[in-house]
Image (tube, rainbow, N blue to C red):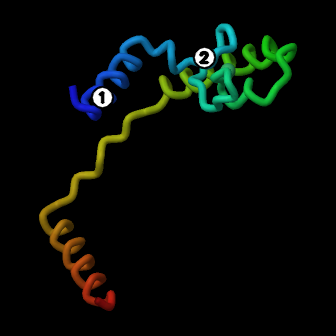
Amino acid sequence: MSLARARDQRIADQAATGDELRCMARDCPNLWSVDKGDRCCSAHAWAEPHEWPRITQEQQALSAERARAASNRVYKPPRQYTREEKRELLNRLLHAFRKVPA
Ligand SMILES: [Zn+2]
């Protein structure tokens, strides 16, 4: 197995479980981002261990809020341009490129 293929397989294995990517603080919803021997999210990594339960609760509340906001997001379909509008945009781009020195 080539080195690149072995690396790709390792990444795929990690993605399959996801646990290797989790912050090590119990019940923390975040992925780890700071490796100081223990892999923690940035919220836990720089705090004292006795503060972790409170921080975990804060992170869980933030995660829930992000999920709620994402579920309320309204999908806005992309604008549809007419053939004439497309032609005008392309002309404006062409003129803009002509003004840029080579
Ligand atoms: Zn964490």
- Tell me the SS state at disc 2: loop
- Tell me the SS state at disc 1: helix
Residue 81 rendering spot, x and y as whole percentages: 21, 58
Q: Which of the 4 image quarters holds residue 1?
A: top left
* Residue at the outermost top position: 26
Crowd class of label 1 (few under 14; some 14 to 19; many from 20; radius 10 Å) = few
Q: Is residue 100 above or below residue 1?
A: below
* Residue at the outermost left position: 83
User: Mark 1 or 2 closer to N-term?
Assistant: 1
Residue type of the residue flagged with mark 2:
Pro
Identify the residue position indicated by label 2 in the image: 29
Residue found at x 74% / y 14%: 57
Identify the residue position indicated by label 1 in the image: 8
Q: Is mark 2 within 8 Å of ligand 1?
A: yes
Residue found at x 28% / y 89%: 102
Residue type of the residue flagged with mark 1:
Asp
Residue 55 rendering spot, x and y as whole percentages: 77, 19
Residue found at x 27% / y 82%: 97
Residue 26 rendering spot, x and y as whole percentages: 68, 8
Which residue is at the front of the view, 58 or 94?
A: 58
